[in-house]
Amino acid sequence: MDIRPTNSELEILNVLWRRGPSSVREVHNILDKRRKTGYTTVLKLMQIMAEKGLVTRDEQNRAHVYSALPAESETQRNLVDDLVDRVFGGSAHKLALHALGSKKATPAELAELRKLLDDLEEQV
């Protein structure tokens, strides 16, 4: 699935990835703590997301329960691929250099990156 969620849809997906299956009320309560959001706005967004295939809706109970359809890693991969293509001319190298140059990585993150690079070199 290669559907790019909007920023608002991504906020909802993040709630569902963290909490698991949730009602509109539960998602709304979490989002409303971050910034004031109307219940009906969240409801409408989640209905649209169901039509787009971003969430599934279990209608067995009175309160419909929604689940994120794409895995978080799949969505991240699609968004990064899009970013690399649109912003960095298809160059993962440029993206990595920019990301590492603009944010300080922890020693553990650097070790993980070194391992990834070693693994990739072995595949060549």
Image (cartoon, rainbow, N blue to C red):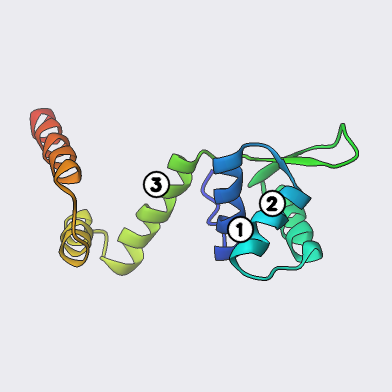
In terms of image quadrants, where is residue 18?
top right
At label 3, which amino acid type do we have? Arg
Front one among 35 and 94: 35
* Mark 2 vs mark 3, CA separation in Å: 24 Å
Residue 53's x, y, as percent? 66, 45
Using residue 29 as the reference point, say whether residue 96 is left or right of it. Answer: left
Residue 23's x, y, as percent? 76, 44
At label 1, which amino acid type do we have? Glu
Front one among 21 and 44: 21
The residue lying at 55 percent from left, 56 percent from top is: 10
Q: Are marks 2 and 3 in contact (CB under 8 Å)?
A: no
Q: Which residue is mark 3?
A: 77
Residue 87's x, y, as percent? 31, 68
Residue density around tag 2, few if under 14, some if 14–19, many if 20 or more, within 10 Å? many
The residue lying at 67 percent from left, 63 percent from top is: 32
Above or below 70: residue 123: above
- The C terminus lies in quadrant: top left
Q: How many marks?
A: 3
Q: Which residue is mark 2?
A: 27
The residue lying at 13 percent from left, 34 percent from top is: 115
At label 2, which amino acid type do we have? Val
